[in-house]
Image (cartoon, rainbow, N blue to C red):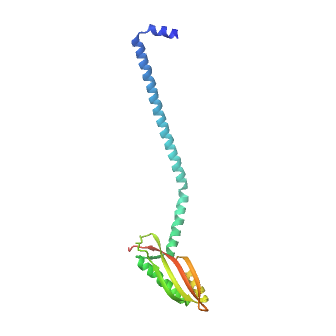
Amino acid sequence: MNRVIDVLRRFDRKTILLVSVALLLFLNLFRLAAGYYNDQKAEVETQQALLAQYQATAAKLPELKKQVGRLERRAGLLEDYLFTGTSVDEISSAMQIMLQKMVTDAGLDPESIRPIVQGKKGESGKYESIEIKIRLAGTMPQLVDFLGRFYKNKKLFVVDSFTVKPYKKTELKVFFDIKGFYSIKTAG
């Protein structure tokens, strides 16, 4: 330690100060260069990660195109099973007429077939449902015939509830709560 002090006494204060400033300046430049290098390295690593992600996505593209094709075909098939029309009232009327025809063709007595439309406006292209309450009277063979017609039809219905009660000796009272699905199509 004494040697360092002896060496420092040989130089004047200006020289020591200039050397100290130069050393601090050099260290600060080194720190800035190291920071710039680290920033550039992080930028390159980010770009490499993005490139790898892009390459992985691009490799999946043919499979995704196949999936899109399959989904478009399935959507087309679904469209065939939906009721379509320009308004909810038109569609609910078509559902009611179709169910009325199935009921009368099966020989059942339709006590009531009423769609319940909940005051919402259907949006074009969106799938919605209409609840329909059906009340029937008839015999067991007529009910079986109706169920056969109901499940053979080409429109999408979901049975929410189904109740059968005996009526008189040979007849039944049948209650259905079903949903019919539709899509609104705009004109043109």
Q: Is residue 184 above or below residue 22?
A: below
Splitting the image into 4 quarters, where does residue 140 fall?
bottom right
| Residue 54, horizontal then vertical, whole percent | 51, 50
- Residue 136 visible in image: yes
What is the quadrant of the C terminus in the image? Answer: bottom left
Residue 167 in picture, x, y percent from top left = 58, 89
The location of residue 63, given as percent across then percent down, is 55, 59
- Count of picture labels: 0
Q: Is residue 22 left or right of residue 110?
A: left
Residue displayed at 41% across by 19% down: 21
Q: Above or below — where is 149 with respect to 76?
A: below
Q: Is residue 151 visible?
A: no
Q: Is residue 119 left or right of residue 150?
A: left
Q: Residue at x 57, y 81 (%)?
A: 163
Residue at the extreme left: 188
Front residue (pair 21, 144): 144
Q: Nearer the viewer, residue 21 or 44?
A: 21
62 left or right, relative to 183: right
Q: Residue at x 52, y 61 (%)?
A: 65
Residue shown at 46% from the left, 80% from the top:
115
Residue 100 screen position, x and y as percent: 49, 86
Say if 17 sits above or below 33 in the image. Answer: above
